[in-house]
Image (cartoon, rainbow, N blue to C red):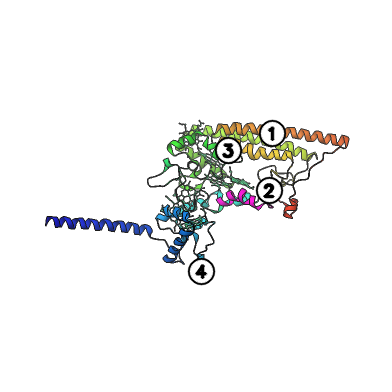
Amino acid sequence: MKFKVNYILWFVVAVLVIGGIALVSLSRQNMVIPTGATKAQAKEFEEKYKELTPLKYELWKESAHGQNGVTCINCHGTEGFKEGDLAYANFSKVDPETCGSCHEKEYEGWKETRHVKAVDFSQKNVRFKLLDAYPAMQNQGCDACHTKVAETCTSCHQGHTTALPKPEEAAHEGEVVTDNITNGCENCHMGPDHPQREAYESSVHHQVAQATGEPTCVTCHTDPENNHYIIQLKGEHEEEGREKLWNNCLQCHTEEYVEDARRNVNAIKKESNRIVAEAKKIIVGLYEDGILEPSPGSLLDENGVPMLNAKGTSYSHVSHIENLMFELFKYAQATTIKGAQHFAPDYAHWHGLADLWNKYLAIKREAERLRMEAGLEAETGVAIEEYPMHKYEKETGNELQTLSNK
Ligand code: HEC
Ligand code: HEC
Ligand code: HEC
Ligand code: HEC
Ligand code: HEC
Ligand code: HEC
Ligand code: HEC
């Protein structure tokens, strides 16, 4: 009798446990079937690509999506079903609206960042236009950063892994993270023209983040209310945005300390702007005195003067002195400012300010040489013989002069 009661008890426990496991795994595999498709079709899709792209399948299976019943066609759509085959069109890009249909708050934040305007900034740029004959480079050398960040969630995430781009030390319980201290920002925010990655990685803050998980790019640059809203720093939002950004420092520092740091950054910006303006004045003087013709790789401003800035001047199709100017504002000045903004002394000074002066002195010397050459030419009639420019017209059929500042 005693034995029998024990037996029944154990049986009941076993049923409960097995039933519980079955229930949990059922709910885990509960697919979210998009409208216009059936569960069978969703399964068929999974099975087909399990054969065709086994690694993608495995990655997805292990991800938070695979584990929570978010299936292939939730992201890749159901268009193919209408034709009755499974050759799907939109494998290369999943719209943020699709991700946003399930992750609303992230979508709302993302939509309000300036990233969504990034295509405009690159494709209206003179350097992009000069690459019209070279679409492979437009694609890899501009769009792979600008278009990607403007049009996808997968600029910082990936399609098939859901591990969060943040340091392990900052993870909450149960979160799968990539231990990525630079939050996925680093693919684009790096290099000689915007070395935020290099500057941050050589700063004290990076050391602190390796130990504690913060501060990262996200700690400083996003709204405390929404980690997908990257605070805007330009245009109409500039003033309010910068206040917000510097306010984020107060999580860890005192007001006086932050004010001090901000004064330093602003002073460095001001001085580097002054050096750039001096260099520009030297070159504009050459145009005004008829010693230098504006080059086709430099757009004219509203007063008919070459812009000599990030928007309107290229490294190609310009004279040597304009090329030096390009390096001065696009690399040396950018590095000085971005190094200072991220408290990386080596970038602010040696990669930055020292190089700014190197380029300034080279521009000054080149202007003196051009003036002497012009004097000699007037005196002797001997002109310098120029090599023809690598032809743009030949490659595109367009007149280079038709590049406009719009
Ligand atoms: C959460 C959304 C999402 C889910 C779910 C998803 N994918 Fe993708 N997939 C993407 C994104 C985004 C890309 C574009 C490339 C990238 O960012 O990785 C992509 C790219 C692809 C590609 C093209 C790239 C290549 O290497 O050929 C294939 C094939 C693919 N996915 C198959 C699948 C299959 C099969 C499943 C289900 C087992 C699946 N995907 C589930 C988002 C998803
Ligand atoms: C059909 C709804 C659906 C779609 C579409 C979808 N997701 Fe998800 N996503 C989920 C669910 C459900 C989870 C797992 C539960 C959770 O963490 O919210 C998840 C988890 C994630 C996670 C992990 C969150 C964590 O805390 O670990 C990331 C990152 C993510 N999704 C990004 C994306 C991206 C990027 C896309 C588009 C390429 C996308 N999702 C499309 C429903 C969806
Ligand atoms: C490695 C990724 C990457 C590539 C490649 C790239 N950019 Fe950018 N670009 C960026 C980032 C990141 C910024 C923002 C830098 C900052 O604010 O400090 C930026 C800023 C700009 C800006 C200034 C926009 C503004 O804020 O006013 C212009 C103009 C621009 N890029 C044009 C181009 C053009 C044209 C190309 C191709 C010839 C190109 N970029 C290639 C990443 C890239
Ligand atoms: C500019 C880079 C970037 C882009 C673009 C981006 N994310 Fe994220 N995402 C992150 C980072 C970084 C984290 C981790 C945040 C943290 O430190 O807590 C994250 C976290 C997440 C999470 C986990 C929950 C959370 O909010 O912390 C989800 C879900 C997610 N992202 C979805 C999306 C969706 C959907 C989109 C497109 C609408 C998107 N992300 C675009 C960088 C990005
Ligand atoms: C400790 C805080 C902090 C961290 C961490 C941080 N930033 Fe910044 N960032 C700043 C400050 C402060 C500014 C300058 C604001 C100003 O000049 O008013 C700035 C400026 C910028 C700018 C705008 C540059 C411009 O021309 O004004 C970009 C883009 C940027 N950071 C990207 C990043 C990226 C990407 C990371 C991570 C690799 C990062 N930041 C890490 C504080 C931080
Ligand atoms: C796929 C490329 C890419 C990634 C990844 C990326 N960015 Fe950007 N970011 C850009 C480009 C391009 C611009 C300049 C064009 C623009 O402002 O629209 C930019 C501009 C910015 C700006 C200047 C915005 C303003 O209002 O002046 C900040 C700040 C910034 N990014 C921070 C981040 C942070 C933080 C991350 C990671 C969480 C990140 N970015 C990830 C490409 C990227
Ligand atoms: C998550 C905390 C945190 C945030 C947010 C943060 N810091 Fe720091 N910062 C630290 C820590 C910790 C140190 C290391 C020195 C110390 O122990 O105080 C440090 C060091 C510094 C230093 C000294 C750098 C050096 O080379 O010695 C400066 C300057 C600084 N922070 C400015 C800022 C500014 C400005 C911001 C906002 C844009 C900011 N910090 C945001 C934690 C933070």
Residue in the foreground of this view, choosing between 71 and 111: 71
Residue bearing the label numbered 1:
360
Label 3 CB less than 8 angstroms from ligand 5: yes
Q: Which numbered disc, 1 or 2, marks the residue that appears first in the sequence?
A: 2
Q: Is residue 101 above or below residue 238?
A: below
- In the picture, measured across the screen, residue 376 lies left or right of residue 356, that is right
* The N terminus - image quarter: bottom left
SS category of the residue bearing label 4: helix
Residue 7 in the image: state x and y as whole percent. Answer: 17, 56
* Disc 2 residue type (three-letter): Val
What is the count of numbered marks?
Answer: 4
Q: CA distance from mark 4 to mark 1?
A: 63 Å
Q: Magenta residues, as a range?
A: 131-149
Secondary structure mainly formed by the magenta segment: helix
Residue bearing the label numbered 2:
126
Q: CA distance from mark 4 to mark 3?
A: 51 Å
Q: Which numbered disc, 2 or 3, marks the residue that appears first in the sequence?
A: 2
* Direction left: furthest residue: 1
Q: Residues within 10 Å of mark 1 (few under 14, many from 20)?
A: many
Residue bearing the label numbered 4:
82
- In the picture, measured across the screen, residue 83 lies left or right of residue 138, that is left
